[in-house]
Amino acid sequence: MEIANQDLARWLLSWGCHERKSLTVEFPVGVPDEYLPDCVRGVFDGDGSLTVCDYRKVKNGKVYIYPRVNAYICSGSYKFITGLQHRLKLAGFSPSMFEARKKEHKIT
């Protein structure tokens, strides 16, 4: 099934949607703090994942095991992911960013 509509296409273009936008899109700087959770939730819904695993730590010879939960958000746009990282830091989180490679393609 397809949707084809010139008005919808013009509206999407007016909001910055263009060919290969996933490589050039930037995190919107105008998102008010009160809407940031909803914005991040939408990004996570499209490009995120959660992992839960056991984290093992040894302290004074005693082994401690507890669950560790990580949230991942992937993006092909360096500008988007660094903008998101900046906003998350301002909100009190301590996100880390890393670059992953798969064969010849770089994933950030």
Image (cartoon, rainbow, N blue to C red):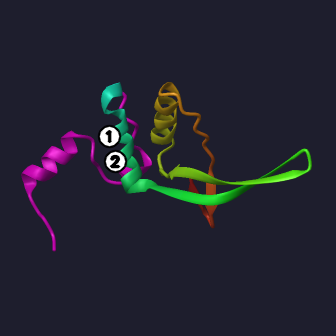
Q: Residue at x 49, y 33 (%)?
A: 88
CA–CA distance between discs 2 and 1?
6 Å
Find numbered disc 2 in the image and state the secondary structure of the residue it sits on: helix
Q: Is residue 102 left or right of residue 47?
A: right
Circle 2 residue: 42
Q: Amino acid at mark 2?
A: Gly
82 in the magenta segment = no
Q: Which region of the structure is painted magenta?
A: 1-29
- Percent position of residue 83, x then y: 47, 34
Out of 98 and 14, give the one closest to the viewer.
98
- Percent position of residue 23, x then y: 44, 49
Task: Give the vertical position of 100 relative to 82 (above or below).
Answer: below
Q: Residue at x 60, y 43 (%)?
A: 97
Q: Amino acid at mark 1?
A: Asp
Find numbered disc 1 in the image and state the secondary structure of the residue it sits on: helix
Q: Can I make out residue 13 in this image?
A: yes
2 in the magenta segment = yes
Task: Give the vertical position of 19 relative to 26 (above or below).
Answer: below
Q: Is residue 87 left or right of residue 7?
A: right
Figure disc tally: 2
Task: Give the vertical position of 21 relative to 15 (above or below).
Answer: below
Out of 84 and 24, give the one closest to the viewer.
84
Out of 59 and 18, give the one closest to the viewer.
59
Task: Give the vertical position of 97 relative to 104 (above or below).
Answer: above
Q: Is residue 82 left or right of residue 22?
A: right
* Callout 2 touching callout 1 (CB < 8 Å): yes
Furthest-front residue in this view: 62
Q: Which labelled disc corresponds to residue 38?
A: 1
Q: Can I make out residue 30 in this image?
A: no
